[in-house]
Amino acid sequence: MSKTIHESTITTKNARSKLEKGIHWRSIDPDSHIGYRKGARGGRWVARWYLSDQKYAQETLGSADDVYPANGVDILDFSQALTAARTLILDRRTNAKIESAGPIPTVKSAVHEYIERRETRERAEHGDVGMKRDTRSRLTKYVLSSTIADIPLHKLDDDELRSWRAQLPPRLKTATVRRLSNDLKACLNAAATMHRKKLPATFTRNIQEGLKVEAAEAAEARRQVLPDADIKRILTATRSIDDQHNWNGDLFRLIAVMASTGARMSQLIRMKVNDVQYTEKRLLIPVSYKGRGTKRIEEIAVSVPDDILRVLRPVTNGRPGNAPLLERWRHIQITPTVWERDKRSPWKTPSELTTPWRAIILATGLPQDTIPYCFRHSSIVRGLRNSLPTRLVAALHDTSVAMIEKHYAAYVVDAMNDLAAKAVVSLIDDTSNVVELRTIKN
């Protein structure tokens, strides 16, 4: 139990000038105090808080404004010192509480935990063959090598996250920065669930604010919406690249299904042969792993045209229903310059599209920053422009109405205006142009 102290008058310079040399205390609460240690030429502010067994911890806050005016940094008046003492004591008590519960989680540990869980899941689903570990590569290069990695999670705030983003290399494309931010957000959200007892109530909000998509980034989605004519140009170029580089239709099939469904590549690569329903003219798309919580459905039925079904025929005929639908050849190196086909296995990660996609876009003459995600943006907008309900568009693309309204607000408004225009009817008979005929008498 803490001892009773003698309260000293230390709130003003005049009162402190009358004190003797030494330490003088005032209570903050029953177990913490702010002190003024007077010396020969001015004094210093000290914070003290009770530990246990009549033991205290003590730290200096800064100089008192006895000689020089307060600047709020290293020279403090009483009010500033009191605020600094309360902040320091709360921080130290929080640290002590977290330390007593085990190792303090940091950004680095959160990233490692997330990567391990993600790769364990992917390994169980696909095995190690061709697994590129894109997320591990990005997070290692741009997060684990940054000073943010060593920050304890309970001290991580939105300013730290914004500072990290601001320090990313300028050469990174906006899409890459957004993908990297989403990777880090996923790590921190997972840590928020795992270590919730060790983290402040504001932690999740700090993540959202610090890694929030800026207006300019959100607008990029609208710039990646392509007219159907441009999507057809991409498919034509893809077929040509497929033929030139002996993809045997694997590249074209993947791009064609992406274009027709608007699904994420991470969903399509998990499709099985029996997910193609020729009679119903639709594909069953596995739901994504995005988001938290348990999803009630496992797949989404998306209608597709006959030409897409014809493209898929060669990889479904005669194959088991549980076999992977979209595959590609894997190669092994025979000599430093010679590679040979080894076996077929499912596509693994979006990075496998990087090189062929660059060639495809070059062949179309479209802007070089066009990304495969343009198919998803374009599919969502196509649904809105064709007056599909926003809820249906969201369901077909495995996302939420809130996300549709947030990122495609302009198109939602246009679609609603079109619907409203169709409901307009004329209510007043216009007789201004009617000419009365004269009666002719015989």
Image (spheres, grey):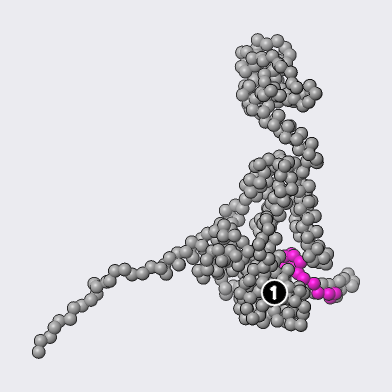
Residue situated in front as seen by the camera: 437 or 363: 437
Residue in view at x 74 percent, y 65 percent: 349
Residue in view at x 28 percent, y 71 percent: 429
In which quadrant of the rendered image does the C terminus lie? bottom left
Residue situated in front as seen by the camera: 259 or 403: 403
Q: What is the count of numbered marks? A: 1
Quarter occupied by residue 42: top right
Q: Residue furthest front?
A: 296
Instruction: Kindly state the secondary structure of the residue where label 1 is placed.
Output: helix
Q: Is residue 45 visible?
A: no
Q: Residue furthest left?
A: 442
The percent position of residue 321, horizontal first and vertical second, equals 75, 76
Q: Is residue 97 magenta?
A: no
Q: Is residue 342 magenta?
A: yes
Q: Is residue 275 above or below residue 70?
A: below
Q: Which residue is mark 1?
A: 275
The percent position of residue 79, horizontal first and vertical second, equals 61, 24
Q: Residue furthest right?
A: 335
- Give the residues in magenta: 341-354
Residue in view at x 24 percent, y 72 percent: 432
Residue 88 in the figure: left or right of residue 442: right
Residue 414 in the figure: left or right of residue 291: left
Quarter occupied by residue 263: bottom right
Give neighbour class at mark 1: few <14, some 14-19, many 20+ (Cα, 10 Å).
Answer: many
Q: Is residue 292 above or below residue 305?
A: above
Residue in view at x 24 percent, y 75 percent: 433
- What amino acid type is highlighted by mark number 1? Asp
Residue situated in front as seen by the camera: 435 or 245: 435
Q: Is residue 120 above or below residue 48?
A: below
